[in-house]
Image (spheres, rainbow, N blue to C red):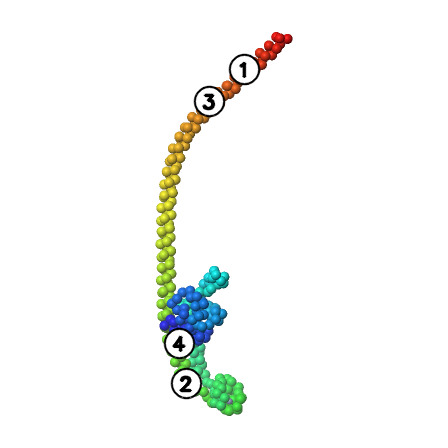
Amino acid sequence: MQIKFLKSIVEHLINKPAVLIVDLLAGKKDVNEFLIAKKLDLTINQTRNILYKLSDYGLVSFIRKKDKRKGWYIYFWTLNIYQSLNLFKNKMNEELNQAKNQLKSREEKRYYLCKICSIEVTEEIALLNDFTCPECEEIYELSNNQGFIDSLNKTINRLEKEIQLINIELEIEEERINKKKAKKIKVAETEKKDKRKKNREKNIEIKKKLAKKEGKKKASKKTIKKKSSKKEGKKKASKKTIKKKIFKKAVKKKVSKLFDKLKKKKKK
Ligand SMILES: [Zn+2]
């Protein structure tokens, strides 16, 4: 049923040959445009023109991918079933309103007809023309509205039934879309939960490791401190002894110099 409606809308908006596209896209996703062109026996540009028109109405959508070897973009097309049905419903509603307006005027107004020219006019125009056809000067006859009223009633019936059927299809499609959405949301939520759980576990693990390290550090810091304080002590001690040694050497030097001077003076 959906396919029938989709074909009707494509025929309505584009033309009869374009209807074949619906068969090629129905029930599929991301169909390569070159494949569509081949199946339709059209050039790629002719095919794209039809698809672009359909996409202007929102009946199809595309994704494009770059062909790595050739360097150009290839379009992949998908039928928008819900939008197409909705658009079709709007069209049918428009037609229905027109038919209802026509019915109303046929029921309320009088029309006049020139049988020779097959031209029908409203009562106002007939009055203006003195009930005589300006083309052939034949006198107007009152139109038989009943024929119009019967056929308009049939049209209205048909359109109302069709709109009902489209509404059923729209509901089905809506349900399908909602289920899909709900599924997506559920998947996303479970993914989020899993992620949070993993993060929590990771954090706990990290905290544990940190705590262990802290413990070790504290312990090792103490030993380091102890070791270093010992070293410091040794260092300080050794510095002192070195200073002492240097001092002693210096004193010795000075004393020996003084002795030398004294010796020289004695010689003199
Ligand atoms: Zn006439």
- Mark 4–mark 2 Cα distance, whole angstroms, equals 19 Å
Q: Earlier in the sequence, mark 3 or mark 2?
A: 2
Q: Mark 4 and 1 residues: CB-CB less than 8 Å, in contact?
A: no
Q: Name the residue under label 1.
A: 252
x and y, in percent, of residue 196 in the image: 37, 50
The answer to whether residue 161 shows anywhere in this view is yes
Q: Which of marks 1 and 3 is nearer the N terminus?
A: 3
Q: Residue at x 37, y 38 (%)?
A: 212
- Mark 3–mark 2 Cα distance, whole angstroms, equals 129 Å
Q: Name the residue under label 4.
A: 159
- Mark 4–mark 3 Cα distance, whole angstroms, equals 111 Å
- Mark 4–mark 1 Cα distance, whole angstroms, equals 129 Å
- Mark 1–mark 3 Cα distance, whole angstroms, equals 23 Å
Q: Earlier in the sequence, mark 4 or mark 2?
A: 2
Q: Name the residue under label 2.
A: 147
> Disc 4 vs disc 2: which is toward the camera?
4
Disc 2 crowd rating (10 Å Cα; few below 14, some 14-19, many 20+) is few
> Disc 1 vs disc 3: which is toward the camera?
1
